[in-house]
Image: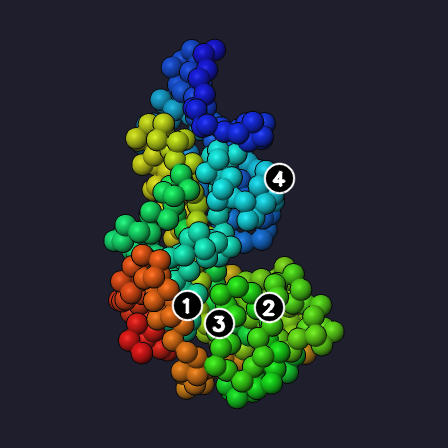
Amino acid sequence: MHKFAIKLGLTAGAVALASSAMFTAPAAAQQEIHLTVASGQPLRAMVSLNMVETFFMPEVEKRMKESGLDKKYKIVWKTAWAGSLLKPTQVLEGTRDGITDIGFEPTIFHPDKLPLEQISFVTPFATSDVVQVGKALDALHAAIPEFKAQYDKFNVVRLGGSSFDSYELFTTKPVGKFEDIAGKKIATAGAALQWLRGTPATPVTSNMTLYYNNAKTGVIDGFIIFPSAIPGMKFPEAAPYVTKVGFGAQYAAALIINKDVYNKLPPEVRKVLHEAASAWTGAADQRTQEAGEAGFKSVPKFAGAQGYVLPREEQTKWANAMPNIAKEWAANMEKQGLPGNKALSAYMEEIRKSGAKPVRDWDKK
């Protein structure tokens, strides 16, 4: 059996770990294409990640068969989930270096390396519809070359993206109006901390692994996270008042492939990967939306827990109390030579075009 490996230019350490794409030509002339797919998190951590295995990979197989490509090529998958090959913060560089061929890259971990990908986090209260956010980001990637160029710097190609369901507020005491957060210590992570700027709450830097215990012990009065996490994390046990503030769905991850591997694939196989990834984006975003809604509806099932929906006028108070973090971000992008203003206007226009009615038009005021 004749084999030839794609040359990736790996370091010695990477070669030891890698399962680089490889073509195998069996006697029947069907070529085997070996691809490793890796993530830093376990499959159960996110709906979209789980669907890389349960939807994207089978979708590739289905489309190969439908197009007749399965007679010429066979994808041989190898998976490495839960940090077994790369930790969550290593996926971008690990895919670049060929340690994995395809990686599930949490874009939220790299505001410095993938700065334009953070746009939804600086436009809170825009839309709670996960599918709308996914479509808007895809439109930006198609229309603004600098979005693709972010990935070019890391020798990877973005196949598709995925988003989290709308972030909401979990507290130890009821919050029914904006003023109720006065003096409360509210924890969240990363760019979401900006949503507390200008408000009477006290922001606390933390992460979702600490929220439960810190709320239970009184270290914090609440935290901001997406409701789809409720079934796994049991957050209402520690913070029984869940207020649907509507911070919005947030673009958070991308499915990427090493560019050297990508370029050596037959063009028709590359096309299938893109089509399957696009279908994965739509399906995963829809499933995530449903998971978020189900998570919020499950709140009353926890003893003593209650769910609230913040009225539009209270959302407006919150959004208008904040500085315009979107325009601040856009100005910072411009200083880096990136089209921040263009990206902001395009994103908000895509959101409005999709039927959403943002609480605040961040590109205008």
Q: State which tag comes first along the sequence, 3 or 1.
A: 1
Label 3: element kind: helix
Label 1: element kind: helix
Q: Are marks 3 and 1 in contact (CB under 8 Å)?
A: yes
User: Residue at the spot x=53%, y=29% of the render?
Assistant: 11
Label 2, label 1: how many angstroms apart (C-alpha)?
Answer: 17 Å
User: Where, quadrant-wise, is the C terminus in this rendering?
Assistant: bottom left
Type of amino acid under label 2: Thr
Residue 81, position as x, y percentages in the image:
58, 42
Q: State which tag comes first along the sequence, 2 or 1.
A: 1
Label 2, label 3: how many angstroms apart (C-alpha)?
Answer: 11 Å
| Residue hosting label 4 | 84
Q: Nearer the viewer, mark 2 or mark 4?
A: 2
Label 1, label 4: how many angstroms apart (C-alpha)?
Answer: 32 Å
Label 4: element kind: loop
| Residue hosting label 1 | 122
Q: State which tag comes first along the sequence, 1 or 4.
A: 4
| Side (left or right) of 275 relative to 13 | left
Q: Are marks 2 and 4 in contact (CB under 8 Å)?
A: no
Label 1: few (<14), some or many (≥20) within 10 Å? many
- The reply to whether residue 362 is in sight is yes
Type of amino acid under label 3: Gln
| Residue hosting label 3 | 194
Label 3, label 4: how many angstroms apart (C-alpha)?
Answer: 33 Å
Could you say which is closer to the camera, residue 131 or residue 38? 38
Q: State which tag comes first along the sequence, 3 or 4.
A: 4
- Against 72, is 242 above or below? below
Type of amino acid under label 4: Ser
- Against 48, is 9 above or below? above
Q: Residue furthest front?
A: 335
- Against 200, is 8 above or below? above
| Residue hosting label 2 | 205
